Amino acid sequence: MQMIISVRDLTKKYGDFEAVKGISFEVREGEIFGLLGPNGAGKSTTLEIIETLREKTSGSVTVDGLDLDKEPGEIKKIIGVQLQTSGYYPGLNLTELIELFGGLYNQTVKPLELLDLVNLRDKAKAKFKELSGGQKQRFSIATTLINRPKIIFLDEPTTGLDPQARRNLWELIQDIRSKGTTVILTTHYMDEAEVLCDRVAIIDSGKIIALETPDRLIDNLVAGGFERPKEVKKANLEDVFIQLTGHALRPEH
């Protein structure tokens, strides 16, 4: 399978502190790739370097054959980056925001088609601040798709959402990937990584300590003699909550 991102011996230092300590990994075209790790592990720093938003100290990064050092402007054209929610003009509605971002990307956009993708057509005239948490996240993902990117980057996309909104967002991310877009995400939620990610890199203290499919990482742990102290049930409380609150019956509003 084609590699769309290649990172080699990447380091990032802030004075004497080394946030990223010589990590290497590759992302395959069309996969959902997860970067997992505790706060301060170096996940976001690594993403921001690949996104051309932060300078690296050393190492090499190529994105779809483009060298980060030589062609950062070309890389920007083929990636979509989820903005922090503070980046939206409060006076504009969703349609106007999409048109604004389209202008920034020099792209002709069809706002309603984009809002359809993320199930927000009925909110076209709403202001960003009027949306629920899940709707805000879906809209921010819609903005990553404006320039029809080959790769989108999602930094902890479901933090703070209720279980139903999280599941809705998972379905959206899987749908985006099914259309051929490569997705790279960071998350604190291991269940999220297990459901979504084809492969995960676990980062701790600036180093990758494991890189594999979630299934294989779990199988390796079990093969080493690990046993959960509690009997594993066929469902969990989150499944109960979603079943009772009608996940299948209604979209999130």
Image: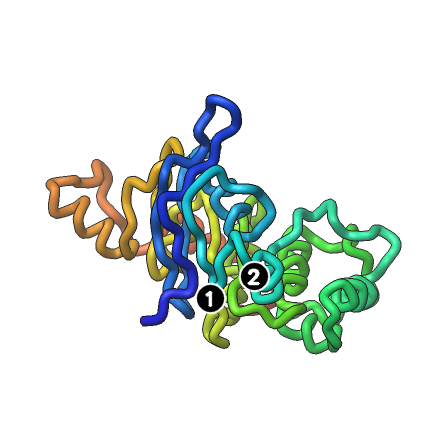
On the rendered structure, is 36 left or right of 84? left
Please tell me which residue is depicted at 36% across the width and 39% down the height of the picture. 22
| Residue at 40% across, 39% down | 37
Residue 127: percent from left, percent from top = 82, 57
Q: Amino acid at mark 2?
A: Ile
Residue at position x 35%, y 70% in the image: 2
Q: Nearer the viewer, residue 107 or 174?
A: 107
Quarter holding residue 139 = bottom right
Question: Dividing the picture into quarters, in which one does residue 75 lie?
Answer: bottom right
Mark identifier at residue 75 = 2
x and y percent of residue 115 in the render?
Answer: 69, 71
Using the image as rendered, state which of residue 206 and residue 66 is in the foreground. Answer: 66
The picture places residue 133, in percent across and down from the top left corner, at: 66, 51
Q: Which mark is residue 222?
A: none
CA neighbours of label 2 inside 10 A, class few (<14), some (14 to 19), many (20+): many
- Which residue position holds label 1? 64
- Callout 2 touching callout 1 (CB < 8 Å): yes
Relative height, residue 43 to residue 94 (above, below): above
Q: In what element is the residue under mark 2?
A: helix
**Residue furthest to the right:** 91
Earlier residue among tags 2 and 1: 1
In this picture, residue 156 sits left or right of residue 143:
left
Residue 169 screen position, x and y as percent: 54, 60
